[in-house]
Every structure is written in structure tokens, then in C-alpha cells.
Amino acid sequence: MRLLLFCQLFFVGIQASKLGVSPPSQRDQVNCQLYTVQPNDSCIGIISNNNITYAQLLSWNPSLNPTCSNLASLNSSSICVSNPKGTFSISSNTNGATIIATTTAPIPSPTLDQTTSRCAKYYQVVDGDDCSHLTAQFAITLKDFLFLNSEVFQNCTNLKSGYYYCVEPVGYISTYPGYLPTATTKPFNQTSATSLPYAGDPWAKFSSNVSVIPIANNTRVDCYSYTYVTNLTENLSADCWNLAMFYDITPEELVLWNPSLGDDSSSGSNVVSDETSRIASAIAVPTTASSLITNPYTYPCTLAANISYCVALVSPTADLPTTTAPPGPHASGEVSNCTTWFAPQAYNTCRDILYIAQLSFADFYQMNPSVGPDCSGLVVGTNYCISTYPNGNDPNEWDGDASIPSASSTGIITPTPIQSGMVSNCNKFYDVHSNDGCSAIASSQNINLSSFYQWNPAVKTDCSGLQASVYVCIGVATTSASITTTSKPPTGVITPTPTQSGMVSNCNKFYDVHSNDGCSAIASSQNINLSSFYQWNPAVKTDCSGLQASVYVCVGTAATTTAPGITTPTPTQSGMVSGCNKFYDVHAGDGCSAIASSQKIALSSLYKWNPAVKTDCSGLQASVYICIGVATANAAAARITG
Ligand SMILES: *[C@@H]1O[C@H](CO)[C@@H](O)[C@H](O)[C@H]1NC(C)=O
Ligand SMILES: *[C@@H]1O[C@H](CO)[C@@H](O)[C@H](O)[C@H]1NC(C)=O
Ligand SMILES: *[C@@H]1O[C@H](CO)[C@@H](O)[C@H](O)[C@H]1NC(C)=O
Ligand SMILES: *[C@@H]1O[C@H](CO)[C@@H](O)[C@H](O)[C@H]1NC(C)=O
Ligand SMILES: *[C@@H]1O[C@H](CO)[C@@H](O)[C@H](O)[C@H]1NC(C)=O
Ligand SMILES: *[C@@H]1O[C@H](CO)[C@@H](O)[C@H](O)[C@H]1NC(C)=O
Ligand SMILES: *[C@@H]1O[C@H](CO)[C@@H](O)[C@H](O)[C@H]1NC(C)=O
Ligand SMILES: *[C@@H]1O[C@H](CO)[C@@H](O)[C@H](O)[C@H]1NC(C)=O
Ligand SMILES: *[C@@H]1O[C@H](CO)[C@@H](O)[C@H](O)[C@H]1NC(C)=O
Ligand SMILES: *[C@@H]1O[C@H](CO)[C@@H](O)[C@H](O)[C@H]1NC(C)=O
Ligand SMILES: *[C@@H]1O[C@H](CO)[C@@H](O)[C@H](O)[C@H]1NC(C)=O
Ligand SMILES: *[C@@H]1O[C@H](CO)[C@@H](O)[C@H](O)[C@H]1NC(C)=O
């Protein structure tokens, strides 16, 4: 064994040294045709010279690397240029090329009806044939055989001996109708559409610069609605208890949902304006009939600016069990159907209540007669009625008029607050707004500035004393027998000078013409029609050419029928209050609130004086005069009982 191995190695070694081949695969190389590598040889040259393929050269010579780049290192050694395992060849196809039949064979007989007539070859079935035999013999698939002979069962149990069956199609069988599955195509109906090119930045909607308003510390985060106040100044919502009232939630709920609003007397971190804190501290809790337990939510509480607070839950909490007992003590003679009360504190003014409850004084007085016509009867700690509506909501719009009448000796209602030192015979008042100036007020009220300063000494002659929300006097009773005195005839009117010549003698209202005035503008601003204006001032002429600056014109005449000294224009609303001394020509588009607001009267007064208008304003008619002022005695009555 060992000797044999040795001999073999020896033999090989002899061969190797003799043939000069490298060791691997040397055993095979004896059987191949050898080629000695020459210095300038390339593999491509070798294969083309020896009629072999590149793959053959590599597979026969494992010492060559796949790219043949090491051929030079095999300089002078021999490589195989024929198969060392011997010569092999693929046996040729003895069956010939596959032939596609092109001619249709004549139909033999008998055939079955459903055997195809387009057939290249028929075969007559004999006893013992079955489909597997036929398909093998004629190299046809069962599927194709069944297709060409469609009467044959799938299980091939009904071949009939002696009948001819088709065993070869003509051409490709796939061209036979019904061989391939029919493509089911659904018709596509083009729907009409307009293609719009997308304009703009498609990502724009995904970015937002809306600043995030943080939620207050410990406020619950599952609320349905949050609110925040950007400027605490003069915003009633900044007060917690007002906020609760606005959102129709109890103070307890507000504090439960927003624990940071809890009573933390030690904190005092809320920086609020004087006005806000005044309002906040002015608020005593309105107690509704549904929560009569002693209310601990009376401490001053103000929201922080730009912080969100929860004001509504997704599922509102159920109402507390209702009780019919009103809080006590309450004011004597209060309206019987009261639902909400308010107990003023020592620091409350009557005006505070009107603001808080959004009531006109007339409404407040009606519900609480004990406060008196000038609210002087207001008693600390007493619960006053502030609403007769369920839940304390007043569905009517508040016109913002929180003025409180005060009885004066002249019968004129003096609003409050007023400038100190105001003349006692003032009969016309103006509620100063924050941006008003003295000249502007005097000019708009058709009074001269010196009279204005004279009537309002506290304003000072440089206007430095003018205060917003404080009433100033803009008219005085001209004589002791003013037009407000019902017994005084219209002759009591003092006619200013100079006046237009030919002016009507019963004029009781005058207008000092300014340089840029026009007749239409004057008539319009004075709520008189232009024809009356021309009639009362003939010197002006009907083309207004006679209008002269600094000369008084007549803008009102004494009436013959209603309030003395007052002309009632026509048409007017039926049922209008008697004693009306100020009228307003309704224009298309006017609303009752707007009229009341612009004329500085309470909406309730407007309704009271003009019953035909109805309290939902539905009776207001364009081009029909309504009453917007009554002789003061009546006015007081109307406002106080209204
Ligand atoms: C290789 O070829 C060179 C000439 O190019 C020759 O001198 C040399 O003997 C050959 N054989 C070997 C093994 O390098
Ligand atoms: C080898 O090939 C180079 C160029 O390919 C040629 O210059 C040189 O003469 C050749 N040498 C031999 C021995 O054929
Ligand atoms: C190359 O080999 C093929 C068969 O592999 C043969 O048909 C052909 O004649 C040969 N060519 C030469 C030049 O030997
Ligand atoms: C073969 O198929 C036919 C028709 O589908 C059927 O009636 C018959 O019973 C089948 N025969 C057998 C043995 O399953
Ligand atoms: C396509 O339109 C025809 C005729 O208008 C209608 O009969 C058919 O149902 C429509 N096909 C589809 C898929 O809407
Ligand atoms: C948002 O802010 C960016 C930069 O602060 C500004 O370029 C962009 O115009 C703003 N987008 C809107 C919608 O204000
Ligand atoms: C919330 O609490 C933090 C720390 O306790 C305090 O700095 C922050 O001012 C508080 N925010 C509000 C709105 O109270
Ligand atoms: C008060 O704040 C609320 C909430 O931000 C706001 O809706 C309301 O307009 C503010 N009122 C005034 C008078 O600024
Ligand atoms: C609250 O935010 C508004 C808008 O960003 C800003 O104008 C206002 O000054 C802020 N108020 C306070 C008190 O920071
Ligand atoms: C808040 O409003 C008042 C007047 O309404 C104004 O004077 C003040 O500057 C405002 N404060 C802020 C922070 O906007
Ligand atoms: C409450 O009663 C007064 C008169 O007693 C009535 O004018 C008012 O409409 C009533 N309020 C409600 C909400 O019914
Ligand atoms: C201002 O008007 C009053 C009458 O209302 C008049 O007595 C006074 O002289 C006028 N003053 C000036 C400067 O016109």
C-alpha cells in the first residue's frame, strides 16, 4: 500500500518533472492536449488558437485565475487546451425539430359532434385506450385533449371505441377561440372633472404661527373650552366670578377646574390694574336659587393674563338639586319671579351692580323697588334681585346704559357720577368718553367752549379736569320756566342773535351755523326734514344759498298739540307716549339698540315710549318718527317705573 503510494508519487514526480507542469490537477493533465505558455501569450490568443472557450480554458486549468492575469507567471509551463476528462458532446436531437402542424386534416368518420374540425391529426380510439395513454402517445396535455374533444369528461370515462378524436391542433392551440380565458373589460366612463393646478405652498397649511396659550397651573386638561384674557384692564372677564357668570358655571366649578384660582390669600401675586381690582373686589357672589349654601367664593380673584382657564367640560356636570328658597335677607317688595340675587358689599356702587348684572337701572329698580328711584335705598348685605330668567341669563341685549337717575329739584334727572361744582340748573348731560376733548364736546353739542367751562368748573379752563365716565353739563335751563315745565307757554324760549331774517316766530330751537355747514347736513343732524328747515328759515332760500355762518337758524318750532314748545313730526308711531319732546326719524337699517345707544337713552325707555315698536323691535318702521325723549317729569317716571 505504502509502496504503491510511493510508486504513484514517484511516477507522478517523474511525469511532473518531465512535463514541467505545476503540481495541482497534474493527474488529469496527462489526458489533455498540452500547450506551453509563451512569454507574450494571452488567454484570448490561446483560446482562439485552440478553438476552445474561455470558460473551458479556466475550468481545465485551475492554476489560472479568473481574469487570466497570472498567465505570465506560467511562462514556459504547460496548460490544458482540451478537456482532461476526455471529449464529451451533447447527443444530437434525433427526433428532429418540433413541428407545428399547419394543415387541417380531413375529418374522418365517425367523430363526435363536439370534436373540433380544425384538427391536424385524428386518432381512432380502440378498446383499452384511455386518456393517459393518448396524451403520452401524442405528446398532448390532457387539458388540450379535452379542449379539442370537448365531449370527453374531465374524468375521461366516456371515450368511445371506434371514434376518431383529435390529438393535434392546427397551429398554436392558444389561437383557438375560447382556449384562453376571455378578458373581462369594464368600460371606463370618463367623468367630467376640472383639473385645477394647485396654487401656493402645499405645506403652508401644516405650519402655523398661532402662539400657544399655556394652560394655568393644575387646570384640568380635558376641558371642552378654555378662555384667556390678553389685557386685564377694563375687562370684566378678568374677574373670576364674572367669568363664571359669563360661562354659566358656578364659582365652585371654576375653582374646581382651575385650582390656581383657589383662595390663596397669601399669594397676592396677581398683578392687576386698579380698575380691575376695584371691579373684582366689588363683586359679591350672585347667589342663584340652585346653590344656596353659604358661598365661600367671595375673595378677590383675577385671572392671569394670557393663561388659559377651563370654562366648560365636555359633559357638563349635573345641576345641583334645585331649591326654591331664595337667599336672605332680600329686599322688600322685590319682584316675585326672581331667580338670581346679588348682595352688594360696602364698596359696591349701584353702577357696579348694573354693570355686573348687565341691567339698566329701570330694570333693576323694577325688580327692586326698595332701592328707590335714585338707588339711594341700596342696603349692604341685602340680596337684590338681578334676574327673573332661569339660570340668571337675560336673553335681552343690554344696551350698556348703567346710568342712574337722581331726582333733582328741577325735575331733571341728573346722571351720576357728575363733575363736582356743576351748575345746578343743568338740564342736559354728556357722558364723557376716554378720548373726548373739551372743544370736541362743546362743538358736537353746539355750545360754545366758554359756556362749557362755566357750567363745569371742575373741568378747569384748560380741560385738564375732564374725566372719562363722568357726566358733564352741556345745557342749562335757560329760564326758571324751562321747556320742561308743562305749564309754560312756548314764548319762554329765548331767541339767540343774530338770526336769519324772516325766521318763523314760534321757533324754539336754534342752530348756530358754522362756516362749512350745509342745509341738508343741518337738517339731517337736527332730525328735521329739509322742507321744514327751508320753511322755518325763508332767508336761507330753497337752494340754501342764503345760509350764513355765525347766524342762527331755526331748527325746531313750537308745537300746537303735544308737549309745549315741541313740534311733533309726522308720521309717528301710534300709541307713542304723550309729552314726547324729542323725536327720531327712523332710517332703513336702524335697530332699536343702535338708536337707543346713539341717542343715549335706555332701550327699555325706547320701548316704553314707543309701544308700537314692541319689545323685540319688530314694530320699528323706517321713515316713521319714534319718541326718544319726553318732558323730564314724564322721563323720570318712565325711567324709574320702566
Ligand atoms: C520565461 O521567458 C523568458 C523570456 O521572456 C525566458 O528567459 C525564461 O527562461 C522563461 N522561463 C521562466 C521560467 O521564467
Ligand atoms: C511581445 O509582444 C510585444 C508587444 O506586444 C512585442 O513588442 C514583442 O516583440 C513580443 N515578444 C515576443 C517574443 O514575441
Ligand atoms: C472549432 O470547433 C467546432 C466544434 O466545437 C468545429 O465545428 C469547428 O470546425 C472548429 N474550428 C476549428 C478551426 O477547428
Ligand atoms: C365522470 O364524470 C362524469 C361527468 O362529470 C360523471 O357523470 C361520472 O359519474 C364520473 N365518473 C366517475 C367514475 O367518477
Ligand atoms: C357608463 O355610461 C353608460 C351610459 O351613460 C352607462 O349605461 C353605464 O352604466 C356607465 N358605466 C359606469 C361604470 O358608470
Ligand atoms: C410664520 O413665521 C415665519 C417666521 O417667523 C414667517 O416667515 C411666516 O411668514 C409666518 N407665517 C404666517 C402665516 O404668518
Ligand atoms: C405655575 O407654577 C410655576 C412654578 O410653580 C410658576 O413659576 C408659574 O408662574 C405658575 N404659573 C401660573 C400661571 O401661575
Ligand atoms: C375680555 O376678554 C375676553 C376673553 O379674552 C374677550 O373675549 C373680550 O373681548 C374681552 N373684552 C374686552 C372688553 O376687552
Ligand atoms: C398677551 O398677549 C397679547 C398677544 O400676544 C399681547 O399683546 C399682550 O401684551 C399680552 N398681555 C400681557 C399682559 O402680557
Ligand atoms: C390694556 O388696555 C389698556 C386700555 O384699554 C391699555 O392702556 C393698556 O396699554 C393695555 N395693556 C396691554 C398690555 O396691552
Ligand atoms: C317676572 O315678572 C315680571 C312682572 O311680575 C314680568 O314683567 C317679567 O317678564 C317676569 N319675568 C319672566 C322671566 O317671566
Ligand atoms: C356762549 O354762549 C352763551 C349762550 O349760550 C353766550 O351768552 C355767550 O356770550 C357765548 N360766548 C361766546 C364767547 O360766544
Image (cartoon, rainbow, N blue to C red):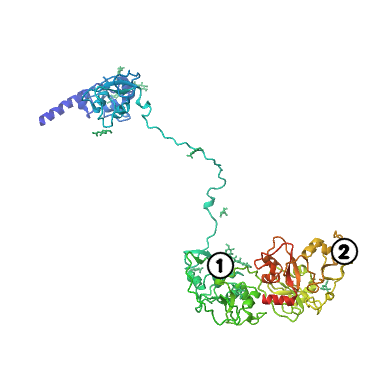
Question: Toward the viewer: 362 or 85?
Answer: 362
Q: Which class describes the residues within 10 Å of circle 2: few (<14), some (14-19), or many (20+)?
A: some
| Image position, residue 388 (x, y; %) | 58, 74
Residue wearing tag 1 = 305
Picture coordinates of residue 252, whole percent (x, y): 50, 73
Q: In the rendered structure, which amino acid carries the disc numbered 1?
A: Ala
User: Looking at the rendering, which quadrant does residue 125 occupy?
Assistant: top left
Q: Report the quarter where the N terminus lies.
A: top left
Foreground mark, 1 or 2, reads 2
Q: How many numbered callouts?
A: 2
User: Does any atom of ligand 9 lie closer than 8 Å to the CB of label 1?
Assistant: yes
Q: Is residue 528 visible?
A: yes
Does dot 2 land on a helix, a strand or a loop?
Answer: helix
Determine which quarter of the picture holds residue 579: bottom right
Residue 413 image position (x, y, % from top left)? 72, 77
Q: Is residue 516 visible?
A: no
Residue that badge 2 annotates:
538
Q: Nearer the viewer, residue 642 or 207?
A: 642
Corner quadrant of residue 389: bottom right
Type of residue at label 2? Pro
